[in-house]
Amino acid sequence: MHIGLIPAVRFEESSQRAIPVIGLYYLASYLEEYGQDIRVTVYKKPEEILEDKPDLAGISSVTENMNIAVSWAEEIKNKLNIPLVLGGNHISALPHTLPQPFDVGVIGEGEETFLQLVNLLQKESQWYRKLKKIQGICFRDRDTGEVVKNTARALIHPITKIPFPRREPSVWGGFHYCFSSRGCPYHCTFCSPTKIWKCYRPFPADYVAEELSQIFRYFNPFYIHFFDDLFIGDRERVKKLRHLINAYGLNRRCNFGGHIRADLMDDELCRDLRGMNFTSGSFGAESGSDKILKFLKTGSTSVEMNQNAIDICYRNGIQLNLSFIIGTPGETEEDIKKTMDFIELNKGKLMGMEVFILLPYPGTPIWTLAKRKGAVSDNMNWDLFRTKAFFSEIDEDMDFVYINDAMDRKTFGKYIKVFKEIDGELNRNNLKIYETIEKTIPPGTKKGNSLPPQ
Ligand code: B12
Ligand code: SF4
């Protein structure tokens, strides 16, 4: 069976098209490892699917790209009439909203569920009558037209059962990243991935070191990014990984970076990180106001902890990129000014920063709050979740879901303008980063099924 996978992206945004969506390459390697007679192609453009005519198409989508996912699905259904599956953060949070013309939605961790689904399709011509048997999906009942949500599937155990994601030279040329864990043990009120991953599951250090070595054999990069929600959630593992990275000699060949947490940082951890040549970290400082931080991070961090972490990283030579959130419910001008002061105070110690407007992503406590206010609904226009990857590109009059009653939208627009300037000043060199990544991808096969040499 030939399966075509594609991420729903906005092609006009370089930040969306430049970095391969690794989840689809995990699905590809899992299906090819554990399935039979399955071939998976990851496509970039829907036209490639129409031309290639796979037996099934799967689309991955985040909330802001759902309108794109639906329009591609409609075109594929009309022209090829093949089964269509939707996966990713959005449908995992709102499975009962599975839009037409998708047949099935995969909720949460996708590998095992998708394999079971594909096995069913391979065996049964009337597969749509047997979907009730597959845990972890939602589907449209063909008789009633209703969306049915099945019982949840347990997370894959042991996690080492998951093969490394497929890495194709035609798409993996520019920027190298991996996941050394899935999930996060914290429960920030705005965070949507926790819904998918439920708990923190680190891959063992030897698994991670092996994956890093594979990346080296294939690409010999000078930097590898751990895109984990939280790279440092298990300190013992950091120590083991430091040891293995040194034993493999990888620390002499490349730098590493990834997401950390302010409350977990101390000198000893920094020494272990530096010991593996982990030289750049990022964490969500979110706000300079303790009141807002308490609301966003359920009391797990404070302004003092953030300051402490900045100072520890600075003196240990770990370069920091901090992210901030504005537009939180209850945020007053006084709160937002505290964030500006915090940035001003620390800008000399930062490598860069990111600013985000608080969006009430489905599945989060903030979504529930926004729903109570009537600001969002299950069948709303998902384009209203659209902002920009780079804050300095945001238009202050842009239409998006705004849920802060403590500041009117016009005044907030004024602060968007101010933060654009702050962001521009701190990130002067970062704006073109995705264009640069894209240009370094070597020209390769159009459909990219070939693997690099072992
Ligand atoms: C790495 C990353 C990026 C990278 C790479 C792009 C990518 N999507 O991989 C970059 C920086 C480019 C990026 C950009 C964006 N991102 Co981003 N990103 C992430 C991050 C940190 C990890 C994603 C990941 O690879 N996870 C690991 C893989 C294994 O998991 P997965 O993708 O969820 O896939 C699994 C399942 O979901 C499922 N699955 C997924 N798709 C499908 C499809 C099918 C058919 C099936 C069967 C199963 C299935 O199976 C997979 C394996 O288990 C997440 C946070 C997170 N932890 O999820 C945010 C996250 C996904 N991003 C987010 C956003 C908003 C964006 C942007 C819109 C930002 C912007 N304004 O430009 C763009 C959109 C880009 C896009 N391609 O859609 C949000 C989405 C929230 C939401 N509900 O919509 C997240 C959750 C972060 C957050 N703010 O909460 N992102
Ligand atoms: S620490 Fe980061 S990944 Fe974890 S719940 Fe908070 S925002 Fe999400």
Image (cartoon, rainbow, N blue to C red):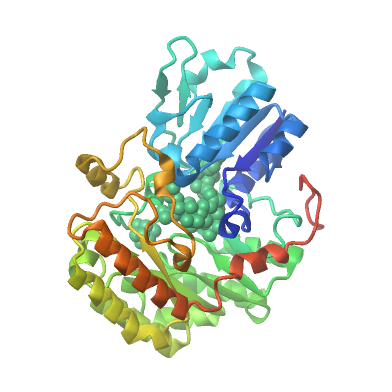
Which quadrant contains ligand 2? bottom left
Residue positioned 44% across, 34% down in the render: 153
Residue positioned 70% across, 54% down in the render: 167
Residue positioned 66% across, 75% down in the render: 250
- Which residue is nearer to you in this view: 409 or 390? 409
Q: Is residue 261 visible?
A: no
Q: Is residue 88 visible?
A: yes
Residue positioned 65% across, 18% down in the render: 123
- Which image quadrant for residue 383? top left
- Which image quadrant for residue 20? bottom right
- Which residue is nearer to you in this view: 65 or 321? 65
Give the left or right position of residue 193, taking residue 6 as reference.
left
Give the left or right position of residue 368, taking residue 47 as reference.
left
What is the quadrant of the C terminus in the image?
bottom right
In this view, 82 is above or below 225 = above
What is the quadrant of the N terminus in the image?
top right
